[in-house]
Amino acid sequence: MSEFDLVIRGGTIVTAAETARGDIGVKDGRIVALAERLPAGARTVDAGGKLVLPGGVDSHCHIAQPKRGPTRNADSFETGTASALAGGTTSVICFSPQFRGEGLLDVLAGYEAAAAAGAMIDYSFHIVLTDPSDRVMQEELPGLIRRGFRSLKIYMAYDTSALSDVQILTVFALARAEGALVTVHAENHAAIMWLSQRLVETGHTAPRYHPWAKPIAVEREACHRVITLAELTDTPIQVFHVSGAESAAEIERAQARGLKVFGETCPQYLLLDETDLDKPGFEGAKLIFSPAARPKENQEALWRCIRRGVLDVVSSDHAPWVYDSRQGKKAHGDNAPFNQVPNGVPGLETRLPLLFSEGVVKGRIDLHTFVAVTATNPARIFGLHPRKGTLAVGADADIALWDPELTKQVRNADLHHAVDYTPYEGMSVTGWPVATFSRGEPVWDGRSVLARPGRGRLLLRGPYDHIRPAGMLPTPFDPVAGRMRG
Ligand code: DUC
Ligand code: ZN
Ligand code: ZN
């Protein structure tokens, strides 16, 4: 009997740091050997001519997220994770929301049950805070963080979720005390409300006006402000979906000062621009996402930020709204004003192929950066590394076998999500996964999803380096501890 359940033979093994030709041996779901040549396994897969990559880690996707009101995420855990694995992603971090006036525990219990029944790959959750009441902050959240939900999400925008600066400071203080990383949707809510109202009152309601209600200044200001608040409490944060170079510059300045501020962007900001919303009729609503698409020139600046490591994660922000549905983009009518259209685009399955094609194939980023921003960095930042996000002895055998020369047109009909469109329809893309393995099990063979719903496991996370404060409070007084430092 072979010592390996699986051997992936003769591929080009790529991590965030290195490239090597050789074999990977897998036993009981983990990588147990990496060598130039291994004996055959119970199953041996020929990876000649292919890249062997760590399965992607998508640290920002909305799957089956519980909702109040008319809208519904189209993707269940089953379709969402099928879509992920068909695109080479093997771990997802989704969102367990809080509804104002309510606690966190009931929603989380229901969400855990839905994921346990449907997920085909491993998953974790960020805890969304929209109402950080004393009760939730004292009685519920500390226990959840200690249980392993070590990341929180807060919003600075949207009527039902925006937190005030005082509330943000309260969340930051608790996050630092308990050891959680806070992720932030950074946009100036009041400015967006005022601009939207002026646009709508004057008849500018079409989807193409969405970016006018959310110019880069509203993101840049919120970035600056939230970084300031994080500095006052010495709390590590990640700014989500950075859309523009001006916001990235705020992050870069904070990083240069030694603050623990991480930045994420998404393929939609690298590939789409504001003119894409200018479509006939209501079609532009498909491209309403927030922060909004920017002018085309902004895209190369974002790629530069990725190359320099200022933005170190590219996630999908997969938001599965069906276009032609009263639960999706048309929830408020066939021609609703832009500010009533649910925000977001689908992108779980296309994230890695698009980034490879537009990034690696077109020479904007190297292969190691590709692996870093799509797998290794999100795993590190959210406490999943070294179990996820890399190819190393001891890591889970989450692997994407990648054909760097396979060129296909993106067609929504070929994707596995439950959405009726992709923003990238017809785009020619080079580089696709021809097989995906999750904990050593084949879950995708380039044509079919092989995984069983419910095989995915909840990833609870222990304390980790990225949530250690930078040790850089601006005054001798520590406002979180409530005493002088030192
Ligand atoms: N913006 C969000 O804030 N959430 C989901 C998707 C989007 O575009
Ligand atoms: Zn957001
Ligand atoms: Zn999001």
Image (tube, rainbow, N blue to C red):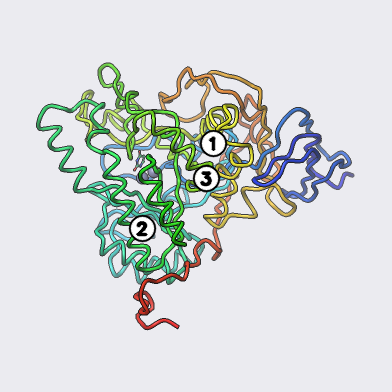
**Separation of disc 2 and disc 3 at Cα?**
20 Å
State the quadrant of the C terminus: bottom left
- Disc number placed over residue 163 in the picture, else none: none
Q: Amino acid at mark 3?
A: Arg
Crowdedness of circle 2 by 10 Å Cα count: few (<14), some, many (20+)? many
Residue 255 drawn above or below residue 66: below
Q: Nearer the viewer, residue 295 or 264?
A: 295
**Separation of disc 3 and disc 1 at Cα?**
27 Å
Can you tell me whether the CB of the residue at mark 2 lies under 8 Å from the nearest atom of ligand 2?
Answer: no
Q: Amino acid at mark 1?
A: Ala
Residue 115 in view of the camera: no
**Separation of disc 2 and disc 1 at Cα?**
31 Å
Q: Nearer the viewer, residue 457 or 470?
A: 470
Q: What residue is shown with label 3?
A: 308
Q: At 48% from the left edge and 48% from the top edge, which residue is drawn?
A: 310
Q: What residue is shown with label 1?
A: 84
Q: At 30% from the left edge and 32% from the top edge, which residue is drawn?
A: 327
Q: Position of residue 1 (x, y in %)?
A: 89, 44
Q: Position of residue 27 (x, y in %)?
A: 77, 48
Circle 2/circle 1 CB separation < 8 Å? no
Looking at the rendering, the quadrant in which ligand 2 lies is top left
Q: Secondary structure at mark 1?
A: helix
Q: Nearer the viewer, residue 277 or 5?
A: 277
Task: Indicate left or right for 114 with 165 as reference.
Answer: right
Q: Position of residue 422 (x, y in %)?
A: 43, 25
- Disc number placed over residue 227 in the picture, else none: 2
Of mark 2 and mark 3, the one earlier in the sequence is 2
Can you tell me whether the CB of the residue at mark 1 lies under 8 Å from the nearest atom of ligand 3?
Answer: no
Of mark 3 and mark 1, the one earlier in the sequence is 1
Q: Amino acid at mark 2?
A: Ile
Residue 486 drawn above or below residue 324: below
Circle 2/circle 3 CB separation < 8 Å? no
